[in-house]
Amino acid sequence: PAAKWNASGRAYPDVAALAGEANPYCMSVGSLMGIGAAGTSAATPVTAAVFARLNHERLSRAGGKPLGFLNPWIYANPQAFNDVTQGLINGGGPDGFPATKHWDAATGWGTPNYEAMLKAI
């Protein structure tokens, strides 16, 4: 349905990251150890950290420049992501999107593969 796309018709997401409560990220806050964190509040900073490390790698090279606006790089380097081909997002409703081979509306190009990303930069 049209409500699932932005106003310009641009498809999203571009990439995905682990966000489910069944497999949360494990973190420590103060004296609390092993707290599970899930959802976009956990997945987004992890993905941002991956791209920050890539920028650090590029900047540490002689004459290195930051990646800048990421979308052109992401779409030019689908091999740098783990293609998610199983699963479905539906938000608990009747409309949803399945994960399929290559780009899909459920997971974009997939999850970051840091080693493959390093090769691509």
Image (tube, helix red, strand yellow):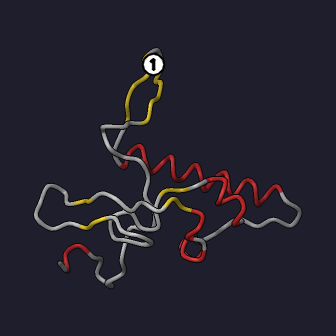
The answer to whether residue 101 is above or below residue 20 is below
Q: Is residue 86 left or right of residue 54?
A: left
Q: Position of residue 119 (x, y in %)?
A: 72, 62
> Which quadrant of the figure contains the C terminus?
bottom right
Q: Is residue 35 left or right of residue 116?
A: left
The residue type indicated by label 1 comes to Met
Q: Which residue is mark 1?
A: 33
Q: Residue furthest bottom?
A: 8
Q: Residues within 10 Å of mark 1 (few under 14, many from 20)?
A: few
Residue depicted at x 27% and y 76%? 5
The local secondary structure at tag 1 comes to strand
The answer to whether residue 76 is above or below residue 116 is below
Q: Position of residue 65 (x, y in %)?
A: 76, 67
| Residue in the foreground of this view, choosing between 102 and 3 | 102
Residue depicted at x 36% and y 49%? 40
Residue 32 occupies quadrant: top left
| Residue in the foreground of this view, choosing between 118 and 8 | 118
> Which quadrant of the figure contains the N terminus?
bottom left
Residue depicted at x 60% and y 56%? 51
Q: Residue furthest top?
A: 31
Residue depicted at x 37% and y 37%? 23
Q: Residue furthest left?
A: 94
The answer to whether residue 87 is above or below residue 1 is above
Q: Position of residue 18 (x, y in %)?
A: 41, 47
